[in-house]
Amino acid sequence: MASNILDLLLDLSPEELELLRKVNQTGAASADELAIKLNRAGDDLTPDLQRLLAHKLLQARTVKAGGEETEIYLTVRDVRSLL
Amino acid sequence: MIGSPLFPFVLCGLAGATLAVLELFQTFDKWLGRYWTNRYVLALIVLNVVTAAAVFAFLRYALGVENSLWLALVTGLTFPAILRSRFTLYRPPGQGGNRPGRDDLALTLDAWYSNLQNRCYEEVNAQIAVRRAEVVARLRRCLTEEQLAEHLSDHVAAGLLPEARQLQQSQLAEIQSLPLAADRERRLAILALELLPDKHVRRLLEKCP
């Protein structure tokens, strides 16, 4: 399992790896928060996050805050131990 | 109080609770205060207290070690090794050693404790993210896009470091150039939460109904 994840991590682009690290560092964050934290305030990071989600490097939770539904992203346990 | 038979248990329990709180505080920092009633946070604290007290009870009553403050102190300092190391509770013959992939049948306290810590980490972080999203939503309700941009511009302009100021100005400009008003508002509120001091954010929210 860990070696599969390591392979996936090695295949990531520098931007994807930076995004994954930022999610890990933040604990849990929305796509908008991550864009601000990565100094990419004008970018939509959803496609990158969805790719990481498809590789099972991230997990997503839909939460309700202030009457709006928001998707937040967290790293999975095996990724946390490798980053 | 010191002569009471319960005193060593209280001492060990305090050591366990202190260690758990220190670990949690190091992870969640200022946010821990708000979420200390989270079930996983409480479970970690209780587990540490119970383990410390159980180790003391084992040494005192099963092994007959003489009751003293030293015993309580040593228990308080050493019980974490049981919860936090690969203290193997169960392993069938032939599964010994640290061969990768061969210890999946071994039940270790460390694995249980790590699992609990991971659940706590995920749940508290998710709650913190929800809390931030609520503040962002309130900022959007309280202030217009122009007001948010104005507060941010003033704050950025007052910055002392030219490099940071330039970076923040470019972030602000990037957000203001987004085509959808909802996206601009949301990101301005997030940038405000990121850049403005807590006191400033609280002041902005106080004006809100």
Image (cartoon, grey):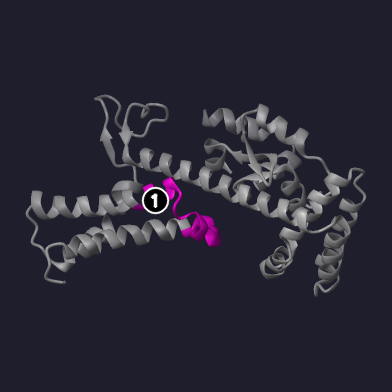
| Above or below for B147 versus B123 | below
Relative to B112, B137 lies left or right: right
Relative to B50, B38 lies left or right: right
Q: Residues within 10 Å of mark 1 (few under 14, many from 20)?
A: some
Q: Is residue A25 visible?
A: no
Q: Secondary structure at mark 1?
A: helix
Q: In which quadrant of the rendered view does residue A23 lie?
A: top right
| Span of residues in magenta | B25-45
x and y, in percent, of residue B62 in the image: 9, 48
Q: In which quadrant of the rendered view does residue B112 lie?
A: top left
Q: How many tags in the picture?
A: 1
Relative to B140, B16 lies left or right: left
What quarter of the picture does the N terminus of chain B occupy? Answer: bottom left
The chief SS type of the magenta part is helix
Q: Chain of mark 1?
A: B
x and y, in percent, of residue A11 in the image: 69, 32
Question: Residue at the location (23% across, 62% down)?
Answer: B10
- In depth, the one of B168 and B94 nearer the eye is B168
x and y, in percent, of residue B118 in the image: 47, 42
Question: Residue at the location (72% across, 51% down)?
Answer: B137
- In depth, the one of B181 and B169 nearer the eye is B181
Relative to B120, B194 lies left or right: right
Q: Residue under circle 1?
A: B42
